[in-house]
Image (tube, rainbow, N blue to C red):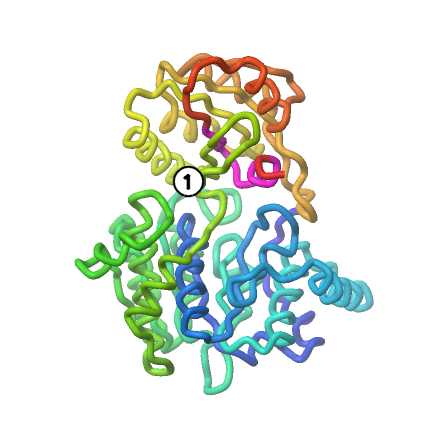
Amino acid sequence: MPIDLGLSRVARLLSHFNNPHLKYKSIHVAGTNGKGSTLAYISSILTQHRLRNGKFTSPHMVELNDCITIDNKTYSRSQFDLVNESVLRVDKELQLKCTEFEILTVTAFKIFELEKVEMALIEVGVGGRLDATNVLEQFKGEGGVVATGITKIGMDHEGLLGDTIEQIALEKAGILKPGIPCFADGSNQESVLNVIRDKAKSLDCELEIVNPDRTDVELLQFSPLLGEYQLNNLAVALRIINSLRKHYTFTRDQIIAGIKNTYWPGRLESIQVPGLGEVLIDGAHNEDAAVALGKYLRSAFPNGNITFIVGITKGKKLNNLLKHILRKNDTVIPALFYQPEQMPWIKCESVENIADVAKSYCQVKIVSEYAYVSDVFDYLKENKCDKSPVVVCGSLYLYADTVR
Protein backbone atom coordinates (compact mmCIF):
# COMPACT_ATOMS: atom_id res chain seq x y z
CA MET A 1 0.00 0.00 0.00
CA PRO A 2 1.15 3.62 -0.45
CA ILE A 3 3.10 5.47 2.25
CA ASP A 4 0.64 6.34 5.03
CA LEU A 5 2.40 8.15 7.85
CA GLY A 6 1.20 7.63 11.43
CA LEU A 7 2.08 5.84 14.65
CA SER A 8 -1.15 4.21 15.84
CA ARG A 9 -1.01 1.02 13.77
CA VAL A 10 2.66 0.29 14.39
CA ALA A 11 2.29 1.05 18.11
CA ARG A 12 -0.57 -1.45 18.42
CA LEU A 13 1.38 -4.10 16.55
CA LEU A 14 4.47 -3.58 18.69
CA SER A 15 2.41 -3.80 21.87
CA HIS A 16 1.27 -7.26 20.81
CA PHE A 17 4.95 -8.26 20.70
CA ASN A 18 5.48 -6.75 24.18
CA ASN A 19 7.22 -3.62 22.86
CA PRO A 20 10.62 -5.03 21.89
CA HIS A 21 11.88 -1.55 20.92
CA LEU A 22 11.94 -0.49 24.57
CA LYS A 23 14.32 -3.25 25.66
CA TYR A 24 17.59 -1.92 24.27
CA LYS A 25 19.26 1.45 23.81
CA SER A 26 18.70 3.18 20.48
CA ILE A 27 20.18 5.91 18.33
CA HIS A 28 17.64 7.53 16.01
CA VAL A 29 18.73 9.52 12.93
CA ALA A 30 16.66 11.63 10.51
CA GLY A 31 17.60 13.77 7.54
CA THR A 32 17.25 13.89 3.77
CA ASN A 33 20.79 12.74 2.92
CA GLY A 34 23.56 11.19 4.99
CA LYS A 35 21.49 9.17 7.47
CA GLY A 36 22.75 5.81 6.28
CA SER A 37 26.41 6.85 6.08
CA THR A 38 26.25 8.30 9.59
CA LEU A 39 24.77 5.11 11.01
CA ALA A 40 27.24 2.99 9.03
CA TYR A 41 30.13 4.80 10.72
CA ILE A 42 28.53 4.35 14.14
CA SER A 43 27.78 0.66 13.59
CA SER A 44 31.32 -0.04 12.44
CA ILE A 45 32.82 1.74 15.47
CA LEU A 46 30.48 -0.05 17.90
CA THR A 47 31.36 -3.36 16.27
CA GLN A 48 35.07 -2.67 16.76
CA HIS A 49 34.25 -1.97 20.40
CA ARG A 50 32.48 -5.37 20.48
CA LEU A 51 29.25 -3.74 21.53
CA ARG A 52 26.49 -5.83 20.01
CA ASN A 53 24.47 -3.59 17.72
CA GLY A 54 21.70 -3.81 15.18
CA LYS A 55 21.15 -1.39 12.30
CA PHE A 56 17.90 -0.75 10.43
CA THR A 57 18.07 1.36 7.26
CA SER A 58 15.86 1.83 4.23
CA PRO A 59 15.38 1.15 1.44
CA HIS A 60 16.94 -2.29 1.15
CA MET A 61 19.60 -2.45 -1.54
CA VAL A 62 19.32 -5.93 -3.10
CA GLU A 63 17.09 -8.15 -0.96
CA LEU A 64 14.59 -7.19 1.71
CA ASN A 65 16.66 -8.56 4.60
CA ASP A 66 19.73 -6.44 3.84
CA CYS A 67 18.08 -3.46 5.53
CA ILE A 68 18.90 -5.14 8.86
CA THR A 69 22.40 -5.86 10.13
CA ILE A 70 23.74 -7.34 13.34
CA ASP A 71 27.28 -6.26 14.21
CA ASN A 72 27.55 -4.81 10.72
CA LYS A 73 26.64 -8.09 8.99
CA THR A 74 23.46 -8.58 6.98
CA TYR A 75 20.85 -10.59 8.84
CA SER A 76 20.16 -13.92 7.16
CA ARG A 77 17.15 -14.16 4.86
CA SER A 78 15.86 -17.37 6.44
CA GLN A 79 15.85 -15.89 9.94
CA PHE A 80 14.43 -12.62 8.64
CA ASP A 81 11.56 -14.45 6.94
CA LEU A 82 10.60 -16.28 10.13
CA VAL A 83 10.21 -13.05 12.07
CA ASN A 84 8.65 -11.15 9.19
CA GLU A 85 6.04 -13.87 8.64
CA SER A 86 5.10 -13.83 12.33
CA VAL A 87 4.63 -10.05 12.18
CA LEU A 88 2.50 -10.32 9.04
CA ARG A 89 0.40 -13.03 10.66
CA VAL A 90 -0.35 -10.94 13.75
CA ASP A 91 -1.11 -7.87 11.61
CA LYS A 92 -3.65 -9.91 9.68
CA GLU A 93 -5.19 -11.41 12.84
CA LEU A 94 -5.62 -7.98 14.42
CA GLN A 95 -6.76 -6.47 11.08
CA LEU A 96 -4.44 -3.51 11.60
CA LYS A 97 -3.63 -3.14 7.90
CA CYS A 98 -0.12 -1.90 8.61
CA THR A 99 1.89 -0.55 5.69
CA GLU A 100 4.83 -2.52 4.33
CA PHE A 101 7.27 -0.17 6.06
CA GLU A 102 5.45 -0.54 9.37
CA ILE A 103 5.67 -4.33 9.06
CA LEU A 104 9.37 -4.00 8.28
CA THR A 105 9.93 -1.69 11.25
CA VAL A 106 8.29 -4.11 13.68
CA THR A 107 10.28 -6.96 12.13
CA ALA A 108 13.53 -5.07 12.71
CA PHE A 109 12.65 -4.13 16.30
CA LYS A 110 11.71 -7.74 17.08
CA ILE A 111 14.90 -9.10 15.50
CA PHE A 112 16.98 -6.75 17.63
CA GLU A 113 15.28 -8.10 20.74
CA LEU A 114 15.79 -11.71 19.67
CA GLU A 115 19.44 -11.03 18.87
CA LYS A 116 19.94 -9.34 22.25
CA VAL A 117 21.52 -6.21 20.82
CA GLU A 118 22.70 -3.61 23.30
CA MET A 119 22.32 -0.73 20.85
CA ALA A 120 19.92 -0.35 17.91
CA LEU A 121 20.75 2.15 15.17
CA ILE A 122 17.55 3.32 13.53
CA GLU A 123 17.20 5.34 10.33
CA VAL A 124 13.97 7.23 9.77
CA GLY A 125 12.08 6.07 6.69
CA VAL A 126 10.25 9.25 5.63
CA GLY A 127 10.16 12.49 7.60
CA GLY A 128 10.40 11.81 11.30
CA ARG A 129 7.48 12.96 13.42
CA LEU A 130 4.99 10.46 11.98
CA ASP A 131 7.47 7.92 10.64
CA ALA A 132 6.87 4.39 11.96
CA THR A 133 10.29 4.36 13.64
CA ASN A 134 9.25 7.30 15.83
CA VAL A 135 7.44 4.99 18.24
CA LEU A 136 10.85 4.95 19.93
CA GLU A 137 10.85 6.64 23.34
CA GLN A 138 13.55 8.40 25.32
CA PHE A 139 15.93 6.30 27.43
CA LYS A 140 14.63 5.72 30.93
CA GLY A 141 17.18 3.36 32.44
CA GLU A 142 16.66 0.12 30.49
CA GLY A 143 15.91 0.82 26.88
CA GLY A 144 15.07 3.72 24.60
CA VAL A 145 16.74 6.49 22.64
CA VAL A 146 20.06 7.71 24.06
CA ALA A 147 20.88 10.11 21.20
CA THR A 148 19.28 11.54 18.08
CA GLY A 149 20.95 12.87 14.96
CA ILE A 150 19.78 15.06 12.10
CA THR A 151 21.85 15.03 8.93
CA LYS A 152 21.56 17.28 5.87
CA ILE A 153 17.97 18.33 5.14
CA GLY A 154 16.78 19.16 1.64
CA MET A 155 13.63 19.18 -0.45
CA ASP A 156 12.20 15.68 -0.85
CA HIS A 157 8.82 14.00 -0.30
CA GLU A 158 7.15 17.42 -0.40
CA GLY A 159 3.72 15.84 -0.84
CA LEU A 160 4.08 14.18 2.57
CA LEU A 161 6.26 16.57 4.54
CA GLY A 162 5.54 20.09 3.29
CA ASP A 163 6.55 22.34 0.44
CA THR A 164 9.10 24.48 2.29
CA ILE A 165 12.39 23.37 3.77
CA GLU A 166 11.32 24.72 7.17
CA GLN A 167 8.20 22.54 7.16
CA ILE A 168 10.30 19.53 6.22
CA ALA A 169 12.80 20.37 8.96
CA LEU A 170 10.00 20.50 11.53
CA GLU A 171 8.89 17.00 10.50
CA LYS A 172 12.47 15.71 10.76
CA ALA A 173 12.92 17.39 14.15
CA GLY A 174 9.93 15.38 15.35
CA ILE A 175 12.32 12.60 16.41
CA LEU A 176 13.88 14.73 19.18
CA LYS A 177 13.16 13.30 22.62
CA PRO A 178 12.76 15.14 25.95
CA GLY A 179 16.11 15.43 27.71
CA ILE A 180 17.96 13.34 25.09
CA PRO A 181 20.92 14.96 23.29
CA CYS A 182 20.60 15.75 19.59
CA PHE A 183 23.39 16.33 17.08
CA ALA A 184 22.55 18.25 13.92
CA ASP A 185 24.67 18.76 10.80
CA GLY A 186 25.85 22.36 10.87
CA SER A 187 25.97 22.60 7.06
CA ASN A 188 22.16 22.87 7.05
CA GLN A 189 20.56 26.19 6.14
CA GLU A 190 20.24 28.58 9.07
CA SER A 191 16.44 28.50 8.81
CA VAL A 192 16.58 24.70 9.19
CA LEU A 193 18.89 24.96 12.19
CA ASN A 194 16.56 27.49 13.79
CA VAL A 195 13.65 25.05 13.50
CA ILE A 196 15.74 22.37 15.18
CA ARG A 197 16.89 24.80 17.88
CA ASP A 198 13.29 25.73 18.69
CA LYS A 199 12.26 22.09 18.89
CA ALA A 200 15.20 21.20 21.15
CA LYS A 201 14.42 24.11 23.44
CA SER A 202 10.78 23.08 23.74
CA LEU A 203 11.85 19.57 24.80
CA ASP A 204 14.68 20.71 27.06
CA CYS A 205 17.17 18.54 25.22
CA GLU A 206 20.80 19.42 24.65
CA LEU A 207 21.49 20.32 21.03
CA GLU A 208 24.88 20.47 19.36
CA ILE A 209 25.14 22.02 15.92
CA VAL A 210 27.97 19.95 14.51
CA ASN A 211 30.62 21.76 12.51
CA PRO A 212 33.61 19.58 11.62
CA ASP A 213 36.83 20.36 13.48
CA ARG A 214 40.47 19.46 12.90
CA THR A 215 40.05 16.04 14.51
CA ASP A 216 37.19 15.19 12.14
CA VAL A 217 39.32 16.20 9.17
CA GLU A 218 42.21 14.04 10.42
CA LEU A 219 39.94 11.03 10.92
CA LEU A 220 38.24 11.42 7.54
CA GLN A 221 41.44 10.23 5.85
CA PHE A 222 40.63 6.73 7.15
CA SER A 223 37.16 6.66 5.57
CA PRO A 224 36.63 4.57 2.43
CA LEU A 225 33.45 6.52 1.63
CA LEU A 226 33.82 9.13 -1.11
CA GLY A 227 32.46 12.65 -1.34
CA GLU A 228 33.24 15.87 0.53
CA TYR A 229 29.92 15.62 2.38
CA GLN A 230 31.24 12.57 4.26
CA LEU A 231 33.13 14.96 6.52
CA ASN A 232 29.82 16.22 7.90
CA ASN A 233 28.36 12.72 8.20
CA LEU A 234 31.44 11.49 10.02
CA ALA A 235 31.44 14.52 12.33
CA VAL A 236 27.84 13.83 13.37
CA ALA A 237 28.65 10.15 13.89
CA LEU A 238 31.67 10.98 16.06
CA ARG A 239 29.68 13.40 18.23
CA ILE A 240 27.09 10.70 18.82
CA ILE A 241 29.84 8.21 19.68
CA ASN A 242 31.33 10.75 22.08
CA SER A 243 27.93 11.19 23.77
CA LEU A 244 27.96 7.46 24.57
CA ARG A 245 31.09 7.81 26.70
CA LYS A 246 28.89 8.05 29.79
CA HIS A 247 28.07 4.39 29.11
CA TYR A 248 31.17 3.11 27.23
CA THR A 249 34.84 3.85 26.65
CA PHE A 250 36.05 4.06 23.05
CA THR A 251 39.74 4.10 22.20
CA ARG A 252 41.15 6.08 19.30
CA ASP A 253 42.30 2.81 17.71
CA GLN A 254 38.75 1.43 17.85
CA ILE A 255 37.39 4.59 16.27
CA ILE A 256 39.98 4.56 13.48
CA ALA A 257 39.42 0.84 12.83
CA GLY A 258 35.68 1.43 12.75
CA ILE A 259 36.02 4.27 10.24
CA LYS A 260 38.36 2.18 8.06
CA ASN A 261 35.89 -0.71 7.97
CA THR A 262 32.80 1.36 7.21
CA TYR A 263 30.82 0.19 4.20
CA TRP A 264 27.76 1.89 2.77
CA PRO A 265 26.62 0.62 -0.66
CA GLY A 266 25.28 2.59 -3.57
CA ARG A 267 26.79 5.95 -2.64
CA LEU A 268 29.75 6.87 -4.85
CA GLU A 269 30.62 3.18 -4.96
CA SER A 270 32.82 1.65 -7.66
CA ILE A 271 31.65 -1.73 -8.91
CA GLN A 272 33.38 -4.07 -11.33
CA VAL A 273 31.04 -5.12 -14.14
CA PRO A 274 32.29 -8.14 -16.12
CA GLY A 275 33.13 -7.16 -19.67
CA LEU A 276 32.71 -3.48 -18.93
CA GLY A 277 35.14 -2.72 -16.11
CA GLU A 278 34.67 -0.22 -13.31
CA VAL A 279 31.30 1.50 -12.98
CA LEU A 280 30.47 4.22 -10.46
CA ILE A 281 27.02 4.05 -8.87
CA ASP A 282 25.38 6.72 -6.76
CA GLY A 283 21.73 7.02 -5.77
CA ALA A 284 21.53 10.82 -6.23
CA HIS A 285 17.77 10.52 -5.74
CA ASN A 286 17.04 14.11 -4.68
CA GLU A 287 18.37 17.53 -5.58
CA ASP A 288 20.90 17.88 -2.77
CA ALA A 289 22.29 14.43 -3.54
CA ALA A 290 22.50 15.35 -7.23
CA VAL A 291 24.42 18.53 -6.35
CA ALA A 292 26.87 16.44 -4.31
CA LEU A 293 27.30 13.91 -7.13
CA GLY A 294 27.86 16.67 -9.69
CA LYS A 295 30.51 18.24 -7.48
CA TYR A 296 32.31 14.93 -7.10
CA LEU A 297 32.20 14.18 -10.83
CA ARG A 298 33.63 17.58 -11.75
CA SER A 299 36.53 16.88 -9.42
CA ALA A 300 37.09 13.25 -10.43
CA PHE A 301 36.40 13.70 -14.16
CA PRO A 302 37.10 17.37 -15.00
CA ASN A 303 36.85 16.76 -18.73
CA GLY A 304 33.40 15.20 -18.54
CA ASN A 305 32.62 12.81 -21.42
CA ILE A 306 30.80 10.51 -19.00
CA THR A 307 28.29 7.86 -20.04
CA PHE A 308 25.37 8.04 -17.61
CA ILE A 309 22.86 5.25 -17.09
CA VAL A 310 19.95 7.10 -15.53
CA GLY A 311 16.89 5.64 -13.86
CA ILE A 312 14.60 7.77 -11.69
CA THR A 313 11.58 7.12 -9.49
CA LYS A 314 8.32 8.45 -10.93
CA GLY A 315 7.25 11.66 -9.24
CA LYS A 316 10.73 13.13 -8.91
CA LYS A 317 11.45 16.46 -10.59
CA LEU A 318 13.73 15.26 -13.37
CA ASN A 319 15.19 18.64 -14.22
CA ASN A 320 16.17 19.29 -10.59
CA LEU A 321 18.26 16.12 -10.59
CA LEU A 322 19.81 16.16 -14.05
CA LYS A 323 20.82 19.83 -14.26
CA HIS A 324 23.40 19.37 -11.50
CA ILE A 325 24.99 16.28 -13.00
CA LEU A 326 25.17 16.55 -16.78
CA ARG A 327 27.61 18.41 -19.04
CA LYS A 328 27.43 18.99 -22.78
CA ASN A 329 29.89 16.28 -23.77
CA ASP A 330 28.21 13.62 -21.61
CA THR A 331 25.81 10.94 -22.85
CA VAL A 332 22.69 9.77 -21.06
CA ILE A 333 21.19 6.33 -21.59
CA PRO A 334 17.84 6.11 -19.77
CA ALA A 335 16.95 2.85 -18.02
CA LEU A 336 14.18 1.27 -16.01
CA PHE A 337 14.64 -0.54 -12.69
CA TYR A 338 12.82 -3.63 -11.47
CA GLN A 339 10.10 -3.30 -8.85
CA PRO A 340 11.75 -3.37 -5.40
CA GLU A 341 10.50 -6.14 -3.14
CA GLN A 342 7.51 -5.23 -0.93
CA MET A 343 7.50 -1.64 -2.20
CA PRO A 344 4.56 -1.66 -4.63
CA TRP A 345 4.14 2.13 -4.48
CA ILE A 346 7.54 2.67 -6.13
CA LYS A 347 7.37 3.14 -9.90
CA CYS A 348 10.18 4.06 -12.28
CA GLU A 349 10.05 7.00 -14.65
CA SER A 350 9.71 6.16 -18.34
CA VAL A 351 12.71 6.08 -20.65
CA GLU A 352 10.97 8.63 -22.85
CA ASN A 353 10.47 11.19 -20.07
CA ILE A 354 14.06 10.91 -18.85
CA ALA A 355 15.31 11.33 -22.41
CA ASP A 356 13.14 14.41 -23.02
CA VAL A 357 14.67 16.23 -20.04
CA ALA A 358 18.25 14.97 -20.50
CA LYS A 359 18.47 16.09 -24.15
CA SER A 360 18.43 19.72 -22.95
CA TYR A 361 21.83 19.14 -21.33
CA CYS A 362 23.69 16.54 -23.39
CA GLN A 363 23.31 13.87 -26.02
CA VAL A 364 20.93 10.98 -25.36
CA LYS A 365 21.02 7.40 -26.55
CA ILE A 366 17.93 5.20 -26.20
CA VAL A 367 18.65 1.48 -26.23
CA SER A 368 14.98 0.63 -25.88
CA GLU A 369 11.91 2.08 -24.21
CA TYR A 370 11.94 -1.08 -22.08
CA ALA A 371 15.69 -1.13 -21.36
CA TYR A 372 16.82 -2.12 -17.87
CA VAL A 373 20.35 -1.65 -16.51
CA SER A 374 21.44 -5.10 -17.72
CA ASP A 375 20.26 -4.25 -21.24
CA VAL A 376 22.28 -1.04 -21.21
CA PHE A 377 25.33 -2.92 -19.93
CA ASP A 378 24.96 -5.39 -22.82
CA TYR A 379 24.70 -2.51 -25.27
CA LEU A 380 27.82 -0.82 -23.89
CA LYS A 381 29.82 -4.05 -24.01
CA GLU A 382 28.96 -4.42 -27.67
CA ASN A 383 29.30 -0.79 -28.75
CA LYS A 384 31.57 1.07 -26.36
CA CYS A 385 34.87 1.85 -28.07
CA ASP A 386 36.24 4.67 -25.94
CA LYS A 387 37.29 4.63 -22.29
CA SER A 388 34.83 7.18 -20.98
CA PRO A 389 33.69 6.54 -17.41
CA VAL A 390 30.29 4.96 -16.75
CA VAL A 391 28.06 6.30 -13.97
CA VAL A 392 24.76 4.76 -12.86
CA CYS A 393 22.59 7.26 -10.98
CA GLY A 394 19.16 8.72 -10.29
CA SER A 395 17.69 6.22 -7.84
CA LEU A 396 18.89 3.89 -5.10
CA TYR A 397 16.65 1.24 -6.63
CA LEU A 398 19.13 0.92 -9.52
CA TYR A 399 21.64 -0.66 -7.16
CA ALA A 400 20.12 -4.13 -7.15
CA ASP A 401 19.92 -4.17 -10.94
CA THR A 402 23.56 -3.06 -11.18
CA VAL A 403 25.09 -5.68 -8.89
CA ARG A 404 22.97 -8.70 -9.80
**Residue 300 placement (x, y as % from top left):** 31, 31
**Outermost bottom residue:** 141
**Outermost left residue:** 214
**Residue 94 placement (x, y as % from top left):** 79, 68
The quarter of the picture where residue 114 lies is bottom right
Region in magenta: 391-401
What's the amino acid at mark 1? Leu
**Residue 231 placement (x, y as % from top left):** 28, 52
Residue at 42% x, 53% y is: 37
Locate the C terminus by quadrant: top right
Note whether 392 is above or below 158 in the view shown: above
Is residue 1 in sight in this rendering?
no
Magenta segment: does it hold 190?
A: no
Q: Is residue 101 left or right of residue 139?
A: right
The quarter of the picture where residue 305 lies is top left
Is residue 175 in sight in this rendering?
yes
Kindly identify which residue carries mark 1.
Answer: 268
Q: Is residue 195 left or right of residue 67?
A: left
Residue at 56% x, 80% y is: 23
**Outermost front residue:** 275
Q: Count every numbered label the image shows and give the total.
A: 1
**Residue 258 placement (x, y as % from top left):** 38, 63
Residue at 51% x, 15% y is: 384
Indicate the secondary structure of the residue bearing disc 1.
Answer: loop
Q: Nearer the viewer, residue 356 or 293?
A: 293
Q: Nearer the viewer, residue 162 or 56?
A: 56
Q: Is residue 161 left or right of residue 298?
A: right
